Image (cartoon, grey):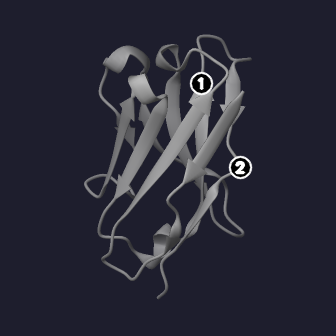
C-alpha cells in the first residue's frame, strides 16, 4: 500500500494550493479518503473526508469549511484537497489517509508541508 502526497509548498496569505494524494495497493474506490494536518505542538486534526462510491456529503473541519474542497478521481486513484484563502494557521504537514470498511484497513501517507507565513 502506498499513499503519496504532493502539492505542498510556501504560499502567501490569501493564496491557494492544491494537494494531491495518489494511492496504490488497495481498492481505492471502496475506501473513504481523508486529509489530516499536523502542526508543531498541536494534535493531529482531521481536515476533510470524502466517502467511498461518491455518496454522502464531505466532511470539513469548521476551521477550513468554505475555504477547502476535497474531491476524488477513482479512475486515477487520487484524492485532492483544494485550499483557498490560506491563512498562517493553516501551516502544517498535511497527511492523506485511506480508511477502509473495517478499522484495521487504515493507511497513511508521509505528508506534504504547507507553509503560510504570517
User: In front: mark 2 or mark 1?
Assistant: 2
Q: Position of residue 91 (x, y in %)?
A: 54, 71
Q: Secondary structure at mark 2?
A: loop
Question: Residue beneath label 1, please?
Answer: 99
Say whether residue 50 is left or right of residue 42: left
Q: Residue at x 36, y 81 (%)?
A: 13
Say whether residue 37 is left or right of residue 60: right
Q: Name, please, the residue furthest toward the left.
A: 66
Earlier along the polypeptide chain: callout 2 or callout 1?
Answer: 1
Q: Residue at x 72, y 69 (%)?
A: 41
Q: Residues within 10 Å of mark 2 (few under 14, many from 20)?
A: some
Q: Residue at x 67, y 63 (%)?
A: 42
Q: Residue at x 67, y 21 (%)?
A: 25
Q: Is residue 59 above or below residue 53?
A: below
Mark count: 2
Q: Position of residue 22 (x, y in %)?
A: 55, 38
Q: Is residue 101 above or below residue 59?
A: above
Picture quarter containing residue 49? top left
Separation of marks 2 and 1 at Cα, in angstroms: 15 Å
Picture quarter containing residue 52? top left
Tags 2 and 1 touching, CB below 8 Å: no
Q: Name, please, the residue furthest toward the bottom.
A: 118
Q: Nearer the viewer, residue 30 or 99?
A: 30
Q: Name, please, the residue furthest toward the front.
A: 76
Q: Residues within 10 Å of mark 1 (few under 14, many from 20)?
A: many
Quadrant containing the N terminus is top right
Question: Residue beneath label 2, please?
Answer: 110
Give the number of the disc on residue 23.
none
Q: Position of residue 81 (x, y in %)?
A: 41, 49
Q: Secondary structure at mark 1?
A: strand
Amino acid at each position: 500500500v502506498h499513499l503519496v502526497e504532493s502539492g505542498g509548498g510556501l504560499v502567501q496569505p490569501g493564496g491557494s494550493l492544491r494537494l494531491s494524494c495518489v494511492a496504490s495497493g488497495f481498492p481505492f474506490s471502496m475506501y473513504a479518503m481523508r486529509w489530516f494536518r499536523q502542526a508543531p505542538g498541536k494534535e493531529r486534526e482531521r481536515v476533510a473526508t470524502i466517502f467511498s462510491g461518491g455518496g454522502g456529503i464531505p466532511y470539513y473541519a469548521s476551521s477550513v469549511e468554505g475555504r477547502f474542497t476535497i474531491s476524488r478521481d477513482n479512475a486515477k486513484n487520487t484524492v485532492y484537497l483544494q485550499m483557498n484563502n490560506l491563512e498562517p494557521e493553516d501551516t502544517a504537514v498535511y497527511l492523506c489517509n485511506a480508511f477502509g470498511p473495517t478499522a484495521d484497513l487504515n493507511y497513511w501517507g508521509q505528508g506534504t508541508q504547507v507553509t503560510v507565513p504570517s
